[in-house]
Image: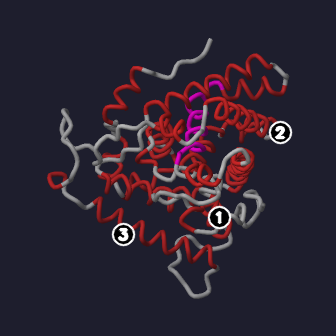
């Protein structure tokens, strides 16, 4: 297993497809169980730190740099095309206050451009942040491999498409107001406070599983929730709870040895990691709401907001997640006392 903290940044050799390692929007059924998702984006950033991100594709480019430039150029063209569509010709349901709900095409173009260009360039420019995100990605991979030991081959393949890992990380993001305090509790061995934080993350994770169906913009709401799919695939609560607890505790411990500046940026690290792990952010309400939209509105999304204002306006508005999303409002995340 190669580490994500190194210059290469690739993970286990069990998953060699570039589509999987960059977590593209497709039904991934590979043997990595989803733990390798996003490793290719860290590989891009490490390679680009020795290159010029603004340069065109050239024969002398290394394989990771050439791969990124091809994806960059494709993402740019797609985003420009979607951004240029007049408001009165956009697809998507009309909203009560005017305008239209974001369409599948606009959502795809924005997330792909943001992840491929904006996030990658930010990782190139912030080597310490990239190193920390690589450490977190290693923890996810390690926990994923431990998790898969108890699964059969069919379950392992379905795991990659289940959004388990991005759901856990996005659930941590939802409670990052408590994160720094809990890291301090880990250092001082305050098990009750650590247990409450992990309990909150588990609560958020469960609500996401209960209310998410994987429906994307423009699609009819699916009738089967991720919780139902988990049960069908034999991913029972006892197994998932143990995994959530183990991974969250490892993440908390990883920050105890880091300087204050990195701890202060933990929310951004986790948001970026969740996006890299997620095979389809447009179909994942918790990742979209807790990670994508806040990052787009922050420093990482500066260029996208300036160059693709129409797309940003569509993506940053509240999304209509359908029937299951309405249920989500009845099951609001609440802090465990």
| Secondary structure under the numbered disc 3 in the rendered image | helix
Q: Residues within 10 Å of mark 3 (few under 14, many from 20)?
A: few
Residue 319 placement: quadrant: top left
Above or below — where is 336 with respect to 56? above
Q: Position of residue 257 (x, y in %)?
A: 83, 39
Q: Which residue is located at x 83 percent, y 27 percent?
A: 187
Q: Residue furthest top?
A: 337
Q: Residue furthest bottom?
A: 59
- Asked whether disc 3 touches disc 1, contact meaning CB atoms under 8 Å apart, the reply is no
Q: Residue furthest left?
A: 88
Left or right: where 311 falls relative to 14: left
Quadrant location of the N terminus? Answer: bottom right
Q: Which residue is located at x 34 percent, y 41 percent?
A: 222
Q: Give me the C-alpha separation between circle 3 and circle 1.
A: 29 Å
Read off the residue under disc 3.
77
Q: Which residue is located at x 54 percent, y 56 percent?
A: 119
Read off the residue under disc 1.
15
Read off the residue under disc 2.
257
Residue 232 magenta: no
Identify the magenta region: 162-178
Residue 254 placement: quadrant: top right
Above or below — where is 43 with respect to 105? below
Q: Give me the C-alpha separation between circle 1 and circle 2.
A: 30 Å
Q: Nearer the viewer, mark 1 or mark 2?
A: 1
Earlier sequence position, callout 3 versus callout 1 = 1
Q: Position of residue 289 (x, y in %)?
A: 45, 37
| Secondary structure under the numbered disc 1 in the rendered image | loop
Q: Residues within 10 Å of mark 1 (few under 14, many from 20)?
A: some
Residue 167 magenta: yes
């Amino acid at each position: 297993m190669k580490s994500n903290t190194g210059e290469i940044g690739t993970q286990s050799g069990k998953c060699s497809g570039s589509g999987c390692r960059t977590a593209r929007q497709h039904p991934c059924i590979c043997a990595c169980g989803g733990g390798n998702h996003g490793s290719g984006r860290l590989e891009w950033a490490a390679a680009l730190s020795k290159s010029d991100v603004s340069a065109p594709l050239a024969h002398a480019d290394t394989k990771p740099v050439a791969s990124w430039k091809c994806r960059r150029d494709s993402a740019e063209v797609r985003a420009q095309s979607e951004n240029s569509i007049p408001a009165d010709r956009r697809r998507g349901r009309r909203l009560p206050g005017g305008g239209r709900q974001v369409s599948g095409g606009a959502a795809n173009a924005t997330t792909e451009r943001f992840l491929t260009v904006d996030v990658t360039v930010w990782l190139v420019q912030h080597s310490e942040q990239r190193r920390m995100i690589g450490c977190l990605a290693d923890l996810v991979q390690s926990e994923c491999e431990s998790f898969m030991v108890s699964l059969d081959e069919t379950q392992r393949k379905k795991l990659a498409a289940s959004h388990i890992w991005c759901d856990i990380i996005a659930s941590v993001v939802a409670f990052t107001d408590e994160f720094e305090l809990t890291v301090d509790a880990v250092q001082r061995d305050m098990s009750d406070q650590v247990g409450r934080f992990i309990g909150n993350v588990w609560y958020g994770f469960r609500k996401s599983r209960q209310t998410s169906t994987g429906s994307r913009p423009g699609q009819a709401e699916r009738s089967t929730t991720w919780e139902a799919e988990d049960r069908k695939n034999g991913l029972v609560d006892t197994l998932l709870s143990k995994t959530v607890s183990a991974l969250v505790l490892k993440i908390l411990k990883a920050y105890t040895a880091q300087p204050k500046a990195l701890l202060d940026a933990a929310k951004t690290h986790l948001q970026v990691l969740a996006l890299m792990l997620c095979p389809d952010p447009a179909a994942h309400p918790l990742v979209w709401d807790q990670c994508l939209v806040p990052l787009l509105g922050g420093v990482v999304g500066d260029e996208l907001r300036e160059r693709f204002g129409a797309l940003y306006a569509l993506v940053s508005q509240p999304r209509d997640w359908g029937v299951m999303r309405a249920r989500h409002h009845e099951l609001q995340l609440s802090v465990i006392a």
